[in-house]
Image (tube, rainbow, N blue to C red):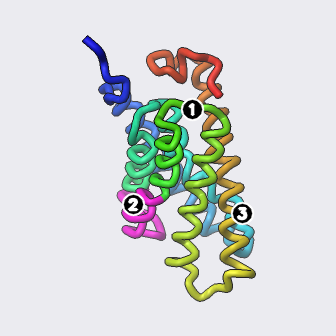
Amino acid sequence: MATNSNRWRTIDIVIASIVAVAFGVIFWAWGLLWNGPADAIPLPGRAVLYGMWLVPAVLGALIVRKPGAAFYTLTLASLVSVAIGTSWGWTLVVQGPLEALGAELIFAAFAYKLYNLPVALLAGATAGIVASVYDAVVWYPETSWATMRIPYIAITAVSSLVIAGLGSVLLVRALAQTGVLDRFAAGRSRALV
């Protein structure tokens, strides 16, 4: 009998949920940094920090390697941060899934078969572009495209490429070396990305 490798196992749901809840708490703390000390850095420069909010999408996909992993992990992380309480409130119920779709579409474009560094970087950058375009339209509608929005989108894309893309790859490599990911392809390969 053939098995469907795209079917989610219980452990996939559990691990993706653990990653999501952990990052939901991290989002709350990251929001304090964004609205606190980092607030001294004017936009668009503060976007250098943005990539952290997109890590769960790339990390979840790299670990679980199933359709929907990026979407599930970042969406749940966003909902957890809403439940804890953020300055952005319920708007994250819309924004989180939109950002997650950016990463999810990249993994889908590679038929959920490639989980290497270039794909992770592209997924992070694409999620960053989706996030920053959303921000530019919803949060900063009165700002200039030339002096704020375009630089903000570019800085966010690079931040997301580095923090969400490369950061997730490095985190999966480190976790794989400990053996905690042995029940996943990411842990068994030891030669991830």
State the residue position of label 1.
115
Q: Earlier in the sequence, mark 3 or mark 2?
A: 2
State the residue position of label 3.
155
Q: Nearer the viewer, mark 3 or mark 2?
A: 3
Q: Is residue 131 magenta?
A: no
Establish if 92 lies above or below 16: below
Residue furthest to the left? 1
Rendered residue at 74%/81% (across/down): 147
Quadrant containing the N terminus in the rendered view: top left
Indicate the amino acid at tag 2.
Val
Does the residue at mark 3 contact the one at mark 2 (Cβ under 8 Å)?
no
**Magenta region, mostly helix, strand or loop?**
helix
Q: Secondary structure at mark 2?
A: helix
Q: Which residues are magenta?
A: 81-98
State the residue position of label 2.
82
Residue 48 as seen in the image, left or right of residue 123 = right
Q: Residues within 10 Å of mark 1 (few under 14, many from 20)?
A: many
Please state which of residues 131 and 47 is positioned toward the viewer in this rendering. Answer: 131
Q: Residues within 10 Å of mark 2 (few under 14, many from 20)?
A: many
Q: Earlier in the sequence, mark 2 or mark 1?
A: 2
Residue 172, x across and y down, in percent: 59, 29
Q: Secondary structure at mark 1?
A: loop
Rendered residue at 61%/40% (across/down): 120
Does the residue at mark 1 contact the one at mark 3 (Cβ under 8 Å)?
no
Residue 89, x across and y down, in percent: 41, 68
Q: How many numbered badges does the structure rendering display?
A: 3
Q: Is residue 96 magenta?
A: yes
Q: Secondary structure at mark 3?
A: helix
